[in-house]
Image (cartoon, rainbow, N blue to C red):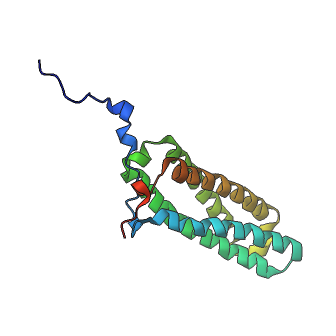
Amino acid sequence: MKEHSTPLNDPIEERRALHSTESRIAIAGHPLHAMLVAFPIALTFCVLGADLFYWWTGDEFWARAAGWAAFGALAMGVLAGITGTVELLIVRGIRNRSPSWTHFILAVMLLSLMGANWALRVGDPAGAILPLGLALSFVAAGMTAMTGWHGGKLVFDYQIGTTPGGSSRS
């Protein structure tokens, strides 16, 4: 019987299925999902801010601004969600990590919430704010913080979407 010159490695111990986490949807090595998520995050907080300004001032400008921000948050969230979902499904190292699925589920729930928040405002932006629109905005802001925290953990703790060694393919 011939002996191996190198020891055999257990693939489960090596965690090979967790190694490939580099983004496949990128521009010059920069992940598209990471670039897009800044917009729905910022716009979701803009909805809350505009709702609070409407509540404080009664100026209908803030109600209209909140409606447009809610639409923008939803639209950009859907774009970010599409890129994130494709990454989740095509990159094995992302798909095989349970925190990736937690982030995905939270993001889908957040998109549903933002869709409801926008739909509530269509037709009567000022009438929609108090009390339900403002409540939805607070919940959406909290969900955004939680979802963003989970996404950040994926990047910083698991290097999801990053190039190994920190180099870029420009």
Q: Which residue corresponds to the image point at 47% horizontal and 42% vertical from the top-left?
A: 97
Q: Which residue corresponds to the image point at 35% horizontal and 39% vertical from the top-left?
A: 16
Between 157 and 51, the residue placed more toward the observer is 157
Outermost residue, front direction? 5
Where 108 sits versus 124, above or below? above
Outermost residue, left direction? 1
Looking at the image, how many numbered discs can be counted on the residues?
0
In the rendered image, the quadrant that contains the C terminus is: bottom left
Q: Picture coordinates of residue 29 (x, y %)? A: 40, 66
Q: Picture coordinates of residue 143 (x, y %)? A: 67, 54
User: In which quadrant of the rendered view does residue 67 lie?
Assistant: bottom right
Residue 133 seen in the figure: yes
Q: Picture coordinates of residue 37 (x, y %)? A: 56, 64
> In the displayed structure, does residue 124 sit left or right of residue 149?
right
Residue 124 seen in the figure: no
User: In which quadrant of the rendered view does residue 122 lie?
Assistant: bottom right
Q: Which residue corresponds to the image point at 40% horizontal and 61% vertical from the top-left?
A: 167
In the rendered image, the quadrant that contains the N terminus is: top left
Between 130 and 102, the residue placed more toward the observer is 102
Q: Picture coordinates of residue 80 (x, y %)? A: 51, 64
